[in-house]
Amino acid sequence: AYARMIDMGIEPYLAADAIIGVMAQRLVRRLCPHCRTPYAPQPGSLPPDFGEPLPRVLWNPAGCRECRGSGYLGRVAIFELVPSSSSIRDACVHQANLAELHRTAARLGYRPLRFDGWQKVREGITSIDEVLRVAGHGLEGSAGESPGVPTPVMNALDANRFGSETSSESSTG
C-alpha cells in the first residue's frame, strides 16, 4: 500500500499518514462437518511454524454426499493485519526494506496469514493441506525474524517494491 502510493507520486510522509492499516485475506475451504475424519498428529509431521503444544486431534477431509466427495463444504477467511503505528510509519517514510518492516511489525504483534490458518486448523475448521495450499509452503518467519516467504501484507508495506501485486490487500484512510 505504501509503495503503491509513493509510486503514484504521493510523498512518503503523506502516504504514511494516510494509511491506518494494511490487511490481507485469503479464503480456505471449510472441512465438511458431515464427513471430516479425526487423526492424531505425530511429532515432526506438522509444519515447523505450526506451534506448540501439539493438538491431540486434527481433522482431514474425507468426502460424502453432502460435500459431493470433496471433503470441504464452504469457505472461511484467514487474515493478517498490520495496523499503522508510529514505528511502521517511520520505517515506511525512511523506505525500510522488507526484513526491517517485518521485524518492526512482529514487535507490534503482527502474525502472518499462516498463523490465523493454523488457529483454524486447531479449531477443526480447515485442514493443514488447505492452509499450505492457500498460504504457501515456505516458512514466513517467527516474531523478530526475517521472513523466508514474504506475506501479502509485508509485500504491500515494502516501500522498496514498486511492481504490481495481486493479493487481497486493502487500505483505509
Image: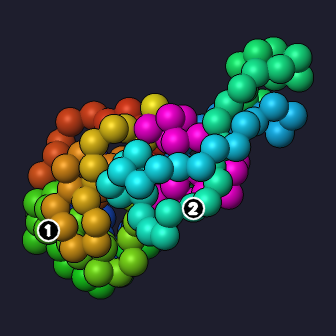
**Left or right position of 21 against 158:** right
Name the residue located 27 percent from the left edge and 49 percent from the top edge.
139
Q: Is residue 121 magenta?
A: yes
Query: On the image, numbered disc 1 is attached to which residue?
Result: 100
Q: Is residue 73 magenta?
A: no
The image quadrant that residue 48 belongs to is: bottom left
Give the residues in magenta: 114-132
The answer to whether residue 91 is above or below residue 15 is below
- Residue 85 can be seen, yes or no: yes
Q: Which mark is residue 66?
A: none
The residue lying toward the viewer, choosing from 83 and 36, is 36
The image quadrant that residue 76 belongs to is: top right
Name the residue located 57 percent from the left edge and 61 percent from the top edge.
55
Q: Position of residue 50 (x, y in %)?
A: 42, 57
Q: Amino acid at mark 2?
A: Pro
- Residue 7 can be seen, yes or no: no
Query: On the image, numbered disc 2 is attached to which residue?
Result: 55
**Left or right position of 157 against 70:** left
The residue lying toward the viewer, choosing from 3 and 63, is 63
Q: Position of residue 96 (x, y in %)?
A: 11, 66
The image quadrant that residue 22 belongs to is: bottom left
Disc 2 to disc 1, how far (Cα)?
33 Å
Query: How crowded is the residue under tag 2: few (<14 C-alpha within 10 Å), some, or many (20+)?
Result: few
Q: Position of residue 82 (x, y in %)?
A: 40, 67
Name the residue located 83 percent from the left edge and 20 percent from the top edge.
64
Q: Amino acid at mark 1?
A: Glu
The residue lying toward the viewer, choosing from 173 and 107, is 107
Q: Are marks 2 and 1 in contact (CB under 8 Å)?
A: no
Judged from the image, the secondary structure of the residue bearing numbered disc 1 is: helix
**Left or right position of 167 against 159:** right
